[in-house]
Amino acid sequence: MVDMTLQNGPRGPKPKRAFTRANIFIYGTLLLVSVYYLLPLYVMIVTSLKGMPEIRMGNVFGPPMEVTFEPWVKAWSQACTGINCDGLSRGFWNSVNILIPSVILSIGIASVNGYALSNWKFKGSEVFFTILIIGAFIPYQTMLYPIVILLREIGLMGELSGLVLVHTVFGMPILTLLFRNYFASVPEELFKAARVDGAGFWRIYFQIMLPMALPIFVVAIILQVTGIWNDFLFGVIYTKPSTYPMTVQLNNIVNSVQGVKEYNVNMAATLLTGLVPLVIYFASGKLFVRGIAAGAVKG
Amino acid sequence: MTYSVEIKELQLNFGAVNVLQNLDLNIHEGEFLVLLGSSGCGKSTLLNCIAGLLEVSDGQIFIKGRNVTWAEPSERGIGMVFQSYALYPQMTVRGNLSFGLKNARLPKAEIEQRVARAASILQIEPLLDRKPGALSGGQRQRVAIGRALVRDVDVFLFDEPLSNLDAKLRVDLRVELKRLHNQLQNTMIYVTHDQIEAMTLADRIAVMKGGKIMQLGSPDEIYNRPRNLYVADFIGSPSMNFLHGELVGGQFKVDDMVMPMTGYEFTSPQVADRPAVIGIRPEHVVTGELAQKAPLQFDVDVDLVEPMGSDTLIYAKLGQHPFRIRMDGQARVKSGEVLPIGIDPSRASLFDKATEDRL
């Protein structure tokens, strides 16, 4: 009777049951929340593929009876904003022209800032950093008008380059913080070894630090691309109709009060505008999370 | 005679904290000098100052007779090996070794030749095209040494290079380092908190505390004739036994025990009576038959016995005072026993209780 326990007792891996109460609760909640978030996206997609007559019939959730891509074409190349009737394409290229130099400039400068602040500490570098960080906490709205004056004085008001400057400046605090914290987590001895090896400021930056900082660069690019692409406030204030970024143009299309509301075109235009950040998130979701976690270590 | 490295009145302050205080140190050509001390004593700081990675507050540093106080690290003729290896992770071993040479704009053929030479000395030729991530700890440290080696420098600086290795590897690399020094005959300055490393490697040891050098001397001097109480306590494991008493007419008295200091070499011929501390190393205490022949004989009460394989460590009481004795690994002693011991005063150390200096 004594060895009964060993022969008949539990042995090996513990069996797992799929339908426990906890599992049902967890997956049920997840399902519910995803439906809640995905339903509007579904409505947008099906509406953008319907013709206006079908939309007027009022079946919002029904799939399109007749799939048409005409609203997408119209949104891209024919929709009118003010006197321009060349669709969102103009805004798209404006946004691209704003995005690329802004991202390159802001990340380029901020990474050097972060590198200098963590490795080449100079007198007052901590004060400089503190001031920069305080900049991140000041509401943008307080600075809108002063920047209007500034841009007007230097002749960049309404120009794409003016908006690039604004995006670069406003990206600086958070990006510098991100890079400084990342470089602070790089062992100091590595930096010392490079100095003993005769490398200077730029050589250490380009040959030692930069190759090690790729994850944080990806994070910074994601942050900046989505942030600048989604920006509406700066775009509407510091540009003029011919240089409006895509978000502003989308607003003008969707909120136009003249004529018939073309819901399918509006939906297509919105989806087109949201495509860039969406692609970025889908392509780099995992890296993004990892980078945020990496940037968070060590103050 | 010119020294390889001369440090004159070196001072370093971090804000109001004096990390190094008026430090003077001369290091001979080809010498292996170990800076030894517990953490925070300024040994790594001193090394960083010699390397030029920290700016000094005052004083001068000479390397090979040249004043390098204001020189860049790469201009000083030094190579440095760090505790965490500090290999450039994105470069291959070859890239790591040649990085400094490329910065110095050496011709390609010369670079290749130097890398090959260093790799053959350190036996890392098969690893040249690997990245540091694919190397073991010992291999990484060898590459780090190689990086200093290729630069063909006068002075090697080591900042606790073996501390990140496991115990067995540490012993192996320690032997290799000593062999390397015999082979290269370069000046080496080596920072460690491990006294075994210090004793085995050094030509001379500088024991540091609070930014000052407490004693500079050969391992033998440091071990047998510690200049003050701190050095005596720091060196040796298990550490020295200290008994606080009085020095009266050449005899050391503690409680009712009297120890005539016959054979002890006083630092000055006339030593006045004063409160004093005697230091006796656990391994200098003899037992058994030898105890009966020793100049001083006592009985101790055994408290606790720690067998360690090669040795047996006895925690005992000499009168009221705790007393450690190191015996042979075969020693059969039980706690509660009374153990006769013998002490040779010529091997003891005597310190002034007030100044803590050797008498």
Image (tube, rainbow, N blue to C red):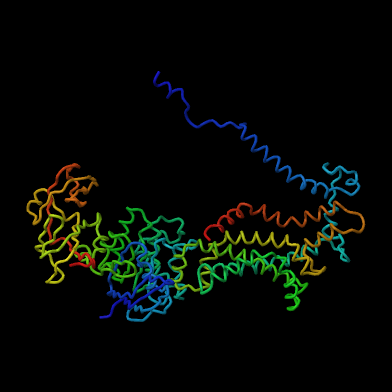
Of the 4 image quadrants, the one containing the C terminus of chain B is bottom left
Question: Horizontal and vertical percent for residue A81?
Answer: 86, 63
Question: Horizontal and vertical percent for residue A130?
Answer: 57, 68
Q: Residue furthest left?
A: B293
Q: Residue at x 65, y 67 (%)?
A: A104
Residue A276 occupies quadrant: bottom right
Which sits in the foreground, A249 or B143? A249
Q: Is residue B161 above or below residue A55?
A: below
Of the 4 image quadrants, the one containing the N terminus of chain B is bottom left
Question: Horizontal and vertical percent for residue A255?
Answer: 85, 58
Which sits in the foreground, B78 or A177? A177
Question: Horizontal and vertical percent for residue B117?
Answer: 36, 67
Q: Residue furthest right?
A: A259
Residue B136 occupies quadrant: bottom left
Q: Name the side, left or right, on which A79 lies relative to B45.
A: right
Q: Residue at x 45, y 61 (%)?
A: B129
Q: Is residue A39 above or below residue B250?
A: above
Q: Name the side, left or right, on which B104 lies relative to B168.
A: right
